[in-house]
Every structure is written in structure tokens, then in C-alpha cells.
Image (cartoon, rainbow, N blue to C red):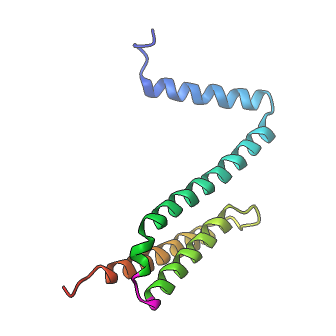
Amino acid sequence: MRGRINPTLRGFVLILVIAGVITALSLQPALWLILLIIQALFLVAIAYAVYRAWRNRRGEIALWGTRAKVVFYGAALVALVDVVAAFLPSWPVGGFEDLVFFCVLGICGFAMWRVWHDEHTYGY
């Protein structure tokens, strides 16, 4: 029987069963706590991945000029503050705030990419 059910349908049925159990047993507070823990773990995972990438490239970054390092690290710091602020419960919710969040991330990413690109362009 397991082979005859479409895997997508089986996944949707599983999601519906889990949602039904949570609703029937009034487990919303427990679900909220689990989601908060997952958000914290997500931030830790992002921080660890960024730290590993920085550690592998710190010798290369040390050779950059002062202006390039200040812009690169400044953009990284602003992006970090933006991401952490978005996970705070006091962060306002709405379309404009989401637009600002993604615009700030995009501008920081562009600034970091531009510095990296300028430091890796050898007169071409």
C-alpha cells in the first residue's frame, strides 16, 4: 500500500494529521516554544557558517586596504543587526518592514560583493 500512494499526497496527509493533533490537543503554546527554539538554532547555524567562511578567508581579507575592510565589515555588521532585529518579538510586522528588511540585506550584500569584486579585479 505504501508504494501506491503518491509521495506528495502522503506528505500533505502527514502535515494535516500533525496540524489536527496540535489543534485537537491545544498544543499551540508548546508549538510556539518549539518555533522559538528553532529560530534561535537557525541564527546560531547562520553565525557558525559565516564564522567558518570568515576564518577560511581572513588572511586574504587582512591584505585589503583599510577602506575596503571598513566597508566590508561594516556592511556585514549592519546585515547581522538587521537579521537579529527581524527575529526579535518587538520587531514590527507588516509589508513595509519586510521591504525595509530585504532592502537593507540587499544593500549590505551589494556593498560586500562590490568590495570583494574590487579587491579581486587585477586591472582588467
Q: Quadrant of the N terminus?
A: top left
Q: Pick whichever, 107 or 27, lies toward us.
A: 107
Residue pictured at 44% horizontal, 80% vertical? 62
Which residue is located at x 65 percent, y 65 percent? 84
Q: Magenta part mainly helix, strand or loop?
A: loop
Q: Position of residue 103 (x, y in %)?
A: 51, 74
Occupied quadrant, residue 17? top right
Residue 68's quadrant in the figure? Answer: bottom left
> Left or right: where does residue 110 sit relative to residue 45?
left
Which part of the image, by quadrant, shows the C terminus?
bottom left
Query: 118 or 35, which is in the foreground?
Result: 118
Residue 45: x %, y % from top left: 57, 53
Q: In the shown orientation, is residue 24 left or right of residue 79?
A: right
Q: Position of residue 47 (x, y in %)?
A: 58, 60
Find the magenta span and give its range. Answer: 63-67
Q: Is residue 27 magenta?
A: no
* Residue furthest out toward the left: 124
Q: How many marks?
A: 0
Q: Could you say where residue 86 lies in the image, as x and y percent from the top left?
A: 65, 65
Farthest top residue in view: 1
Where 74 falls versus 109 (above or below)?
Answer: below
**Identity of the residue drawn at 41% across and 22% down:** 6
Task: Judge left or right: residue 122 versus residue 4.
Answer: left
Relative vertical location of residue 94 with respect to residue 30 in this rendering, above or below: below
